[in-house]
Amino acid sequence: MSESMQKILVIEDDKNTATLVATYLQKEGYATLIENDGVTGLQVARKDNPALVILDLMLPGIDGLEICRHLRNESNIPILMLTAREEEIDRVLGFSLGADDYVVKPFSPRELVKRVKAILRRTHPPTPAPKVLQWQQLLLDPEKHKVSLGKKIINLTTSEYKLLYTLMASPGRVFSRAELLKNLYQQEEAVIERVIDVHINKLRQKIEADPGNPTYIETVRGFGYCFADTGSQ
């Protein structure tokens, strides 16, 4: 998840502090929510499911430790404790309840942002880019949604692309027509299995040098299809 898509909830009764924290987070591309009391803050955390909660220890209504206890019993939302109290027992108790980090007031907003980023890196690791699939001259790039054969771009329909991706992603694996059909039509539409044969024939016309003697998509008679076993050569 990119930073611009991540929402952070700040539960802090001091409005100036809450605004300061939110401002620095927004400069880094995060979306922010601010609540100034414990009861509402807990409700918003449950409803909006933020990527992280910055939680003041001393709050009206319900204190931060109690909110932390509730959230950790219900979810894995990362929690950064924010408090003016620096007694060791408070930090130990906060961590024992499941807090991910602890910052004592007064604090540097930049340091707070760094800690937020560090927590999110641990708890929301970036999704790796989809692997480019290639066999001989045929290349499928999932990130660009592009298929090419040598230097030639191959224009595929949505169904043809899904079908090719499914087969190329598992070379050598035999897929039944029913499996391939399910990948194409997940809404349980009334579609006969022979539709797969039609798509395969059209796909072969576009990617095979000799569609009648295919080298990429192989037919497994009486069952279905598979992509050439790239590990066998």
Image (cartoon, rainbow, N blue to C red):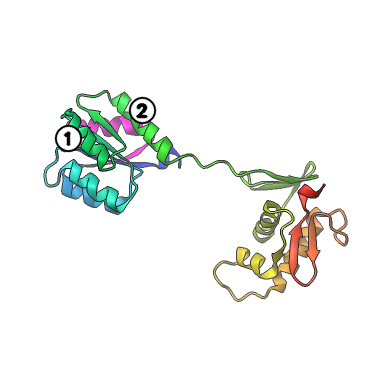
- The residue labelled by disc 2 is 114
- What separation in Å lies between label 1 and label 2 (alpha carbons)? 22 Å
Q: Which quadrant holds residue 98?
A: top left
Q: Amino acid at mark 1?
A: Lys
What x and y, as percent, mark residue 129?
A: 58, 41
Q: Is residue 72 left or right of residue 207?
A: left
SS class, disc 2: helix
Between 156 and 14, the one lying in front of the other is 14
Where does label 1 land, which residue? Answer: 15
| Residue 111 percent location from the top left of the image | 32, 24
Up-down relation of residue 84 to residue 98 (above or below):
above
> Magenta span covers which residues?
14-33
Q: What residue sits 23% from the left and 52% below the top? A: 43
Please rate how many residues cluster around mark 1, counting C-alpha atoms within 10 Å: few if below 14, some from 14 to 19, many from 20: few
Is 61 left, or right, of 21 in this rendering?
left
Image depth: mark 1 or mark 2 in front: 2
Please tell me whether the stretch drawn in magenta is mainly helix, strand or loop. helix
Quadrant in the picture for residue 200: bottom right
Q: Say if the magenta span includes residue 230.
A: no
Image spot of residue 27 (x, y percent): 35, 30
SS class, disc 1: helix
Q: Residue at x 78, y 54 (%)?
A: 228
Residue visible at 46% across and 39% down in the picture: 125
Q: Nearer the viewer, residue 157 or 230?
A: 230
Q: Amino acid at mark 2?
A: Lys
List x then y, in percent, for residue 152. Answer: 78, 44
Determine whether, in the image, residue 36 is placed left or right of residue 225.
left
**Residue 45 seen:** no
The answer to whether residue 22 is magenta is: yes
